[in-house]
Amino acid sequence: MSAINIRNVRKSYGSVEVIHGVSIDIADGEFIVIVGPSGCGKSTLLRMVAGLETITSGEIEIGGRVVNRLEPRERDIAMVFQNYALYPHMTVYDNMAYGLKIAGLSKADIKTRVAKAAEMLQLTPYLDRKPRALSGGQRQRVAMGRALVRDPAAFLLDEPLSNLDAKLRVQMRLEIKQLQRSVGTTALYVTHDQVEAMTLADRLVVMHDGVAEQIDTPMAVYSRPATTYVAGFIGSPAMNMLPAESAGNRGLTLTNGAVVKPRGTRLPEAGRKVILGVRPEHLVLVAPGNADLELDVIAIETLGADTLAHGKLPGAANGDGDLVARLPGSVSVKPGDRLPLAIGPGMAHLFDAGTGARLEEVDLTVDAPTTRTRKKTAAEA
Amino acid sequence: MQNKRTIFGNRVLPYWLLLPQLAITFIFFLWPAAQAVRQSFLREDPFGLKTSFVWFQNYERLFADPLYLNSLKVTAVFALGVAALSLVTALVLALAVERTVRTSRAYTTLLVWPYAVAPAVVGIMWWFLFNPTIGILPYVLSMVGYRWNHVVSHTDAMILVIIAASWKQISYNFLFFLAGLSAIPHSLIEAAAIDGAGPAKRFFTIVFPMLSPTTFFLLVVNIVYAMFDTFGVIHATTEGGPAQATNILVYKVFEDGFIGLNLGSSAAQSVVLMIIVIALTVIQFRWIERRVQY
């Protein structure tokens, strides 16, 4: 159990830099999830922590010890691979005992440790089997067990659940979380699945093109995304992004000419080009007179609890005013409807149109119009 | 019901279509084999005028013949020597090529070339290299105080034929080992590295066990090669000498039959070889089917 400090780490292959200076401070016992699309450098970063890739520049510290020049085996870490990397010619027991045997532990000691891990992971009946005789979930557990028995300073997990089917993935997700809680070992977990990332993480690292765009708790990443990229990546369906220009106190002019004045949001100076981000779940159906913006419905997706209304701003050019609203499942809408929608107070996100960086903090005390209190409307009922 | 079978309208046509293949198998494999078996029970007088049926006398004499028993021993040493030398060398080369990143394809190409060289040419090349009077290697060895002479020394002669026969087999083994190595998932090696295993430990506990099906397959193939395919190499280098020291079974069949004209004994030896190769093939199929899946 130890802290991991990653300081301004860069990685280049030849002249191509793939990781552009990432710094993460991970506290002892913390569960950190690195999430990002494929090719963003998240696996490379993890492999640098593991010692499977060299570090071009910067510093990685595990438990107060700089490990840049140490071999993987000297770093006191355990890794779980996407394909589990179980030794196919060894039994489950031998797979888990392999590292301990090399470490030179006594036979009895190895036996108790493996038995304990097998007990925790419900693998006891399978200890004599070869990996090929196990199901996907069991293999996944053996891979976890192999990491667990060594009682390392940190667990590194590289997309450990992506080879499982959806149901098993949800189950193993919970198990991994509980396991990490109970042993209290620092964990660094890489995934491309934002749901996995949100549910597992104490803190999230959202990576994009070799840069850590935001490092924060799942809730903070969701409610205050630092960039348009993070805003679009976390949350499903993705956040609506509407290009707009500030009209000062009057609000924001959208591309179709409509002016929106989101409540509880401080607006930038007039003339500034911004991107207005609103999550589909923060658009509410209101009476026509109270609408912040309107949505011309093109397609409906019925999910049961919710209904997703896909469409665009009235009069918007193609691909320029696309909008999704997540409505209660009880609402009946159909393609061709024009929905009057309001943005939940304080739920608008503003980003700079050029850099994509988050513009201003949500501030309920400034400029919050009180006249238009939100009313439940007939349509919503 | 899906049926992959082709239905012929004409009942005779399929047999006509099979005929060429059956004819080749019969004329070039079954008939000569049957002839050898028949011949092994016969005895001819020196002028070929009279042939008599002698039951197992040829076999009885064979296994009472110290020269034949010697040849069995020589063949065993030779086959194991060739298999060991070519397997170990090929594995080392394959491991080396696997580690290189940029030039591995060039190395692979170069290492496969020897396989395209005819056995007799290989034999002559090594015969030149090791020639006690004009060869470069005896000259080099004499500098470290070893007097190489395969024309006189049994050991030298055996080493010479083992090297000459192994040389081209290395290419073949190398290709299989390289393919075997690249089939081992990289993450296994990485997992072992994280588990604390150094390079040597990783090789012996992970890589080599996972290569064992390949190794076993190659072992059988190499033994078969050394026993049956090395006639050209022996003929071009030592001709079985000195004093029977490299007279392997296959070469002895040729010597006794075509030089000594003892056709009955030669045929009996062929039948023994046939039984050995059948046994090896059975072992190979039985074991490989069992060992391949882990």
Image (cartoon, coloured by chain):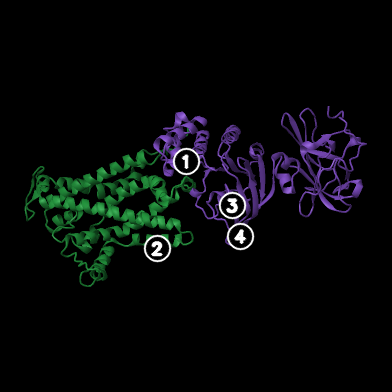
Q: Provide the letter of the chain coloured purple.
A: A
Are discs 4 and 1 located on one and the same chain?
yes
Tell me the kind of residue under disc 1.
Leu
Q: Provide the letter of the chain coloured green.
A: B
Contact, mark 4 vs mark 1 (Cβ under 8 Å): no
As drawn, the label of residue A86 is 1
Q: Position of residue B124 (x, y in %)?
A: 25, 66
| Relative side of A85 to A328, left or right | left
Q: Of the residues under marks 4 and 1, which one precedes in the sequence? A: 4
Is A35 above or below relative to A326? Answer: below
> Quadrant where the C terminus of chain B lies?
top left
Q: Which residue is mark 3?
A: A60
**Visible in this render: residue A236?**
no
| Relative side of A215 to A165, left or right | right
Circle 2 SS class:
helix
Count of numbered labels shown in the rendering: 4
Circle 3 SS class:
strand
As drawn, the label of residue B110 is 2
Q: Which residue is mark 4?
A: A16
At a point 22% along the width and 63% down the height, the residue shown is B237
Q: Position of residue A215 (x, y in %)?
A: 69, 46
Tell me the kind of residue under disc 2.
Leu
Camera-near label (2 vs 4) is 4
Mark 2 belongs to chain: B
| Relative side of B89 to A373, left or right | left
Residue density around tag 3, few if under 14, some if 14–19, many if 20 or more, within 10 Å: many
At a point 75% along the width and 32% down the height, the residue shown is A307
Q: Position of residue A197 (x, y in %)?
A: 65, 40
Distance of label 3 from label 2 (alpha carbons):
42 Å
